[in-house]
Image (cartoon, rainbow, N blue to C red):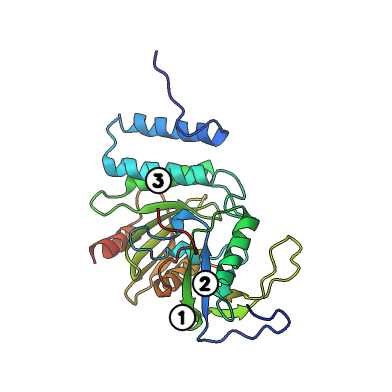
């Protein structure tokens, strides 16, 4: 994983993951993510996890940590290249999580997709574009499809 | 004696869902078509999943009865010639209807508790979007875009 004392800026050729915590966030037939997976709420930023310097096990460890914190199931992740996130007003910025007062697990690989507009329909439109660029759902390691 | 089985649990939300099902049955005189029934089921699932605040992480908002009621009216007003949408709850308490053909042929409609419908479509490179008010009938704008997404 990224050295917590030296978190580099996000580069365009990096890959980030959006973890899936709800069953209705991908299409069962194709495994493609639904736009709702990329629709921000409340903070108008969208959390993602950088693959940079991570093993696959470490990526899943971060996902599992968030799932446990939320009390949710981890159903998988969808990966997307950072350059494909730079749509209209959006960009990806490094946002390390450290000593979070609410107890969110530390994560030097955490990043946010920022720049979502306020209007719901504009957010929905950007979420559709992100979902169109993202890869199909990847199952957590050691888990097979039902 | 006729008894009504409570299908969706024993909580207050489950009671509301039961009432809702009963209302739909009465309105449809027990002749719910398969596609409508599927949509009603989806609505009930969405409401059941999101019936309490915090259902989708910190700060997420429960779907209100008002939103459920508007979404039901919208669903009932949809023309049957198009494919049925997938329905889900959103973290802000809205109900989401989605018509998906492919990842570049998709329409989403978000039902707001005050009767506004936020919508966005992606059709190839076109990305129309907007907000309209629901007044008992599927808005013409939405009919146009549902047709574009479903019929190509």
* Of residues A26 and A68, the one drawn nearer to the viewer in this rendering: A68
Left or right: A106 in relation to B137? right
* Of residues A28 and A122, the one drawn nearer to the viewer in this rendering: A28
Left or right: B143 in relation to B64? left
Residue A145 in the image: state x and y as whole percent.
40, 57
In this orientation, does residue A110 appear? yes
Rendered image quadrant of residue A98: bottom right
The kind of secondary structure element at disc 1 is: helix
Q: Residue at x 55, y 80 (%)?
A: A91
Q: Which residue is mark 2?
A: A17
**B58, above or below A79, in the image:** above
Left or right: B83 in relation to A60? left
Q: Residue at x 27, y 41 (%)?
A: B34
- Subunit that carries the residue with mark 1: A
- Subunit that carries the residue with mark 2: A
- Subunit that carries the residue with mark 3: B
Rendered image quadrant of residue A144: bottom left
Q: Which residue is mark 3?
A: B42
């Amino acid at each position: 994983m990224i050295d917590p004392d030296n978190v580099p800026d996000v580069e365009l050729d990096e890959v980030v993951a959006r973890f899936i915590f709800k069953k209705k966030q991908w299409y069962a037939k194709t495994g493609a993510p639904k736009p709702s997976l990329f629709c921000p709420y409340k903070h108008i930023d969208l959390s993602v996890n950088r693959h940079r310097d991570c093993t696959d096990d470490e990526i899943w460890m971060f996902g599992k940590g968030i799932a446990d914190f939320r009390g949710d199931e981890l159903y998988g992740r969808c990966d997307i290249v950072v350059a494909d996130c730079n749509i209209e007003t959006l960009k990806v910025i490094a946002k390390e999580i450290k000593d979070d007062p609410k107890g969110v697990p530390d994560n030097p690989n955490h990043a946010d997709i920022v720049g979502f507009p306020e209007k719901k329909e504009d957010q929905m439109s950007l979420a559709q574009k992100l979902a169109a660029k993202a890869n199909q759902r990847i199952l957590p390691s050691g888990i097979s499809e039902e | 004696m006729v008894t009504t089985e409570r299908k969706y649990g024993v909580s207050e939300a489950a009671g509301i869902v039961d009432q809702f099902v009963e209302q739909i049955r009465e309105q449809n005189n027990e002749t719910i078509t398969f596609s409508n029934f599927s949509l009603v089921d989806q609505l009930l699932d969405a409401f059941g999943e999101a019936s309490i605040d915090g259902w989708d992480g910190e700060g997420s908002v429960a779907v209100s009865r008002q939103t459920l009621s508007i979404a039901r009216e919208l669903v009932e007003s949809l023309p049957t010639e198009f494919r049925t949408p997938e329905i889900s709850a959103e973290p802000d308490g809205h109900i989401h209807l989605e018509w998906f053909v492919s990842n570049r042929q998709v329409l989403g409609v978000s039902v707001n508790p005050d009767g506004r419908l936020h919508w966005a479509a992606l059709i190839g490179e076109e990305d129309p979007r907007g907000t309209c008010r629901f007044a008992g009938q599927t808005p013409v704008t939405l009919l146009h875009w549902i047709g574009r997404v479903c019929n190509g």
